[in-house]
Amino acid sequence: MMEFSHYKLEIYVPESHFEAVRAALFRVDAGHIGNYDHCLSWSPVRSCWRPLAGTHPWQGTEGALEEADEIKIEVTVTARRLAETLEAVRAAHPYEEPVIQVIPLMLSTDEKNG
């Protein structure tokens, strides 16, 4: 299996918790690319979900389709700090099951040296 040195995280969070999640990411040095740090992008999105039986949703009602505006955060993290970063995001995120997509990155030679 191929090993990757960097990953891109896509994190969906309610706007009310955006600053807390962003601060958590920066505390663990997510978004450090070469000679730059605090590199992070975000954009507004519209999301939907349906809490199933036995859940305890932060927002919504069990069995009902819910919709809400959220913020999608995109940030790069090193493989060596991935577990620590995921733990930091989960601690700052209000959802019972936060959506955190982990995407392996293939970086150019110049970026690997940073």
Image (cartoon, rainbow, N blue to C red):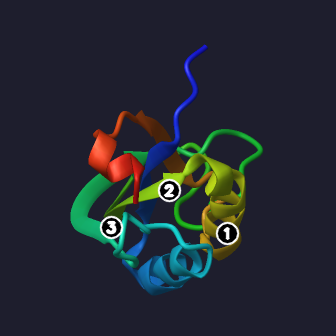
Rendered position, 23 above or below 3: below
Q: Which residue is mark 2?
A: 77
Which quadrant of the structure image shows residue 71? bottom left
Q: Amino acid at mark 3?
A: Ile
The numbered dot on residue 71 is 3
Q: Relative to the observer, which residue lies in front, 46 or 20?
A: 20
Q: Secondary structure at mark 3?
A: strand
Residues under numbered marks 2 and 3 in contact, where contact means CB atoms less than 8 Å apart: no
Which badge, 3 or 1, comes first in the chain's sequence?
3
Q: Amino acid at mark 1?
A: Ala
Which badge, 2 or 3, comes first in the chain's sequence?
3
Is 77 left or right of 35, judged from the image as shown? right
Residues under numbered marks 2 and 1 in contact, where contact means CB atoms less than 8 Å apart: no
- Give the percent coordinates (x, y) of residue 105: 39, 37
* Residue in the image at 45% along x and 86% along y: 19
Q: For the residues marked 2 and 1, what is the alpha-carbon distance in whole angstroms? A: 12 Å
